[in-house]
Amino acid sequence: MSLRFQRLILIIFTLVIFCSAVLLILFNTQKNIVFFYTPSELIKNDKNLLEKKVRIGGYVKKNSFLQKPLNNYQFKITDNISELLVFYEGILPDLFKEGQGTVVEGVLNNKKIIIASKVYAKHDENYMPASIKKELEKNNQWKKDYK
Amino acid sequence: MEKRLQMISLIGFFALCFSTIFSFTLLIPVSIFKINIKYFILIFRLSTFLVCISFISLIFAYVSSDFTNFNVFQNSHSDKPLIYKITGAWGNHEGSILLWICMISLYGFFYSLISKSANEFKILVLKFQSALFIIFALFIILTSNPFLVNSVFVEEGLGLNPILQDPALAIHPPMLYLGYVGFSLVFSLAIASLFRNNLDQDWINEARTWSMISWGFLTAGIALGSYWAYYELGWGGWWFWDPVENISLMPWIAGLALVHSLLMIRGEQAIEKWIVFLAILCFSLSILGTFLVRSGILTSVHSFASDASRGLFILLIFFLTTGFGFLIFLIKTPSKKDDLHLLLINKTSALIINNILMMITVFTILLGTIYPIIIEVLTNKRISVGGPYFNSTVLPILLPGFLLMSIAPVLSWKTNQIKKFRIYVICFLILSLIVSLQSYFTSFNTWGFIGLILGSWIIIASIISIMIRHRFSFTIKYITSINSFIAHIGVGVMIIGVTFSSIYQKEYNFNIEVGDKVSLENEILKFNDMQIIEEKNYQSLKANISIKKKNGNIIYIKPGKNYYPVSKMITTEAGIYHDWFKDIYITLGSENNNIWFIRVLINPLVSFIWLGVIIMVFSSAIAVIKK
């Protein structure tokens, strides 16, 4: 094989890798992303989100938390305008508390009920994702002044 | 007493200020203000000394629980054990940035001690290092001063987040920062070499040492964080593709590419440009990472107090350094016309392909990490990109790299041949046969198959190469000569660990009463009793669980929950039983009428992950000593 030919193969090889990487990225950004909403945004949303995986950020509504047999839980997640009912089976994070911020990932069962597969609470008790916080601030629901 | 305590903060602050001022004087061009190299280095070391004093006084304020310092008040409590008082000094934003600049200065200090370069070059490197120091010192003084005085008188502090009170996490930030900041010195070296137009072996050798040191520390730092997440968060995993993890991975991979390219220069002269580019990129990615974490732009489980002005400042620093770096790179790169010695399969082409793959990986991770920000700006929709995206993009991209890695060290520089090629082929065929049989008789899983075959092939190919090419002896020289193979064996071990622990993980969930027995696959689990233990600054609730293994041995695992009265927080403490082949990982759930919910995870071969990391760090230490 001539030197030139070997170099050509290398370049082609590189291009193939590069293109497949780009394709992979494009394909996965279509498929593997989850949309993030506040409860009111979700309810206002016209798109059909039933049976789709979504993430909801908000507060655990006071006095809405119920423990059904052992590790089955039910609570409401709210942004003080609208609320959604959440069903969850599993271990709740330590920082999960009524009145605290939380993020729930799961599948919408009907317009107001979500079957959660994951419940997050942040390490920090003042946790709220920045983007959700902004939305809450816009509606003047952001009460706490965190330093 | 009060006066004396306030003095500490005052001393710390002034030491920091003077250190910055001294660094400023170093930037004055030599032509205006002629100073001897001796005095130049003396001033630099004085500045290092002062910033260390400043950091030590912060630690002292923490140790003595000086709540007149606002930072101490916010992050400490007099009940904490001494070690967490000390580590509390860098467990918060202000203190950690102080640690950061302390390290920038220390790296310069050690460079001035060790370097054997010409004096002009040394001065130039130290100047760039001081410039970086000043930028970050200004950031501290202007936006995140750890020496602010508390405006009200308080008796007690607010306490450190209990989840951070942990030995692995205590040394995780310094390790990580030693890695990130080490790239600042490589950055300074690269820029200085561009300025002096001396892209020769001298600075390459130095860059090799320093980038190896930084990369080793970064590896250790990331692994410690990951190990902490494994046993402290109680989720049973050790890598979650959290934005914070991703941004530490980017400089790590870029650093890996840098370290490999620096090896390549032994055989080739034409890739200095590329090395300079990587050196700048590594440090830029480190700063970008800091910016993304500290500004609170990204949604992540690490929440540092975020403040818009800080984020803006770090963004400014990022654009300043990166922009400056790449600008100098564009203007000053030499145009040597040495062709690369590319062949179909020789060391140079293997290393180039490896570099390309690593760059694509960095790009993929970067894209996935900032994609939510881009989408939000463009469409005002919020999305989250999680594990599935990264697993299905990053892993396939890395596969050819792993395949290449198994044989790369035995390729030659100038020819297409591999010594004793046949042995490799035969071994590979035998191995594939064994793995195929193994996966045929156990449950088949594509990724499990690929991971197992790649991991073991990397190990076997490296061992064959060691045996063929080097005669065994008990000397350091022998170890240094097979060092690259050792590092690759580490990667192989880690791949096997990662594959098994993520694919063949088994999960059992059940409700159990005190005294009950449950049988798992091979073991019998018994819930003996519940205990409450009073510790210094927390209360601990521990379940006493015994597991009878197949061979009759009984092991005890104590998962539990800790309650920290100061911050009114509960943390889950997973109970983990380690042995070489599997971890039994138990987390305690909630209780109802004396029935407890318990989750048991059987994680096979997790120890291989940590073993692999230890081998890699060991080999990077050897590579540094080799010099």
Image: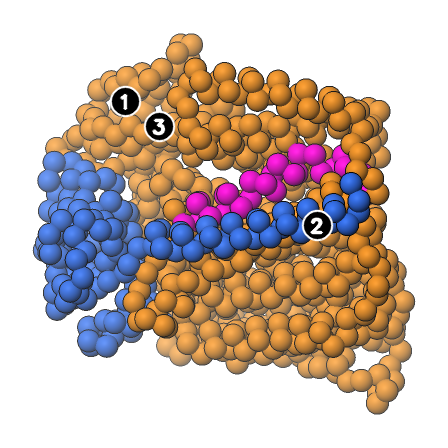
Magenta region: which residues?
B389-413
Q: In this rendering, does residue B302 appear at all?
A: yes
> Residue tagged by mark 3?
B506
> Residue tagged by mark 1?
B528
- The residue located at (83%, 39%) in the rendering is B415
User: Badge 3: few (under 14), some or many (20 or more) residues near its Cα, within 10 Å?
Assistant: some
Q: Chain of mark 1?
A: B
* Residue B7 percent across, percent down from the top left: 56, 75
> Residue tagged by mark 2?
A8
C-alpha distance separating marks 3 and 1:
23 Å
* Residue B295 percent across, percent down from the top left: 44, 70
Image quadrant in which you'd find residue B492: top right
- The residue located at (46%, 20%) in the rendering is B439
Type of residue at label 3?
Lys
- Label 3 in the same subunit as label 1: yes
Q: Earlier in the sequence, mark 3 or mark 1?
A: 3
Letter of the chain in orange: B
Q: Mark 3 near mark 2, Cβ–Cβ under 8 Å?
A: no
User: Badge 1: few (under 14), some or many (20 or more) residues near its Cα, within 10 Å?
Assistant: some
* Residue B270 percent across, percent down from the top left: 81, 58
Left/right of residue B381 with respect to residue B621 in the rendered view: left
Q: In this rendering, does residue A146 appear at all?
A: no
C-alpha distance separating marks 1 and 2:
68 Å
Q: Nearer the viewer, residue B615 or B41?
A: B615
